[in-house]
Image (cartoon, grey):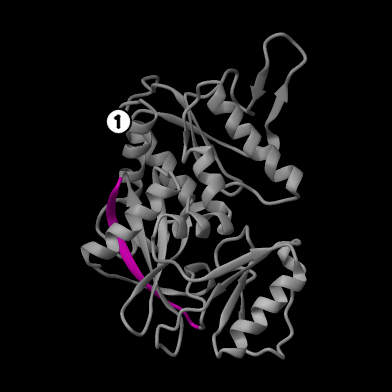
Amino acid sequence: MVSAGSFNADIAIITDDPGWHGQQLTQSLHKCGYKSRFVRLQDCHFDLDSDSPRINLPGFSSLPASVFVRGVPGGSLEQVVYYLDVLHGLEYAGVPVFNNTRGIERSVDKGMTSYLLKLNGIPTPNSFISSDLHYINKKIREYLNQGKKLVLKPIFGSQGKGLQLLEQASQLIDYEHMHGVMYVQEYIDAGESVGVDYRVFVIGDQVIASMKRTGESWITNVAQGGHVESIKLNQTVEQMAIDATRVTELEYAGVDLIRDKQGQFWVTEVNSVPAWKGLQQTTSEAVVDIISSQFLTHCGLTA
């Protein structure tokens, strides 16, 4: 037990909604002797009206010892760029950010994630991305006319929100929430009556746990009602998840995979701010303590 007044340093946890995950992180860091405070990126600002530029975080009289990014809020392009600028600015000022900002940028952008996976030979579904609606509609018709299904996704998004399954050329498609950029991924048929996929949790180049997610519909996310169970995947599949984390240059990640009817696994997404509440139900390991240990090591702090 850490005694009062014996804490080492202040850590900023970037989140809009601390909830269960924020409480877990706070308690885990507390056990290691570190204080933490929740910070919204919307409340941070740059002071550049003197010779000594400063980034102000609410609740901090000086810069934090390190930053744990639990979430980056959405918004307009200008807002999202600004939030990432705050994280980049902290790194430029010598503050370790976890996951690192460049890695977050790569993974939060589904198009760039798919590109990096393809570029590095990691199996991932065929995808096409464009702001040219004529091109997108042409590609969609080509795939659907071949009897293939597609998934239209917001290029920035999580928890299964805004996904559309495209099955017929005559189908009405809602582009309203795509914000002018369309990301379309070939649907991988797992041969199940409902959606089934796998989440592999990678920390420090090691798989610490994996789970199978079964949806109430074709969407498997726990936030959308998906059910989870522990599963042990073979070394080849685990290495795919580790490689996907490496090419996006993340310190830890939740890697999503689908297995097709022939048994081939495909990486569909790499999540740089993954939730672990569902995963914790499938393992006796204290997931948050493993994350905290990796975080403190990455930041040059001691547990």
| Point 56% across, 52% down: residue | 108
| Point 64% across, 48% down: residue | 73
Q: Please provide percent x and percent y for residue 150.
A: 57, 79
Q: Is residue 10 magenta?
A: no
| Point 46% across, 41% down: residue | 99
How crowded pointer 1 is (Cα within 10 Å; few <14, some 14-19, many 20+) is rated as: some
Q: Is residue 209 magenta?
A: yes
Residue 256 placement: quadrant: bottom left
Q: Is residue 173 left or right of residue 107?
A: right
Residue range highlighted in magenta: 205-216
| Residue closest to the eye, 113 or 205 | 113
| Residue closest to the eye, 284 or 203 | 203
| Point 40% across, 88% down: residue | 191
Residue 170 placement: quadrant: bottom right
| Residue closest to the eye, 162 or 22 | 162
Q: Would you name the residue on which mark 1 appears?
A: 303
What type is the residue that disc 1 sits on? Ala
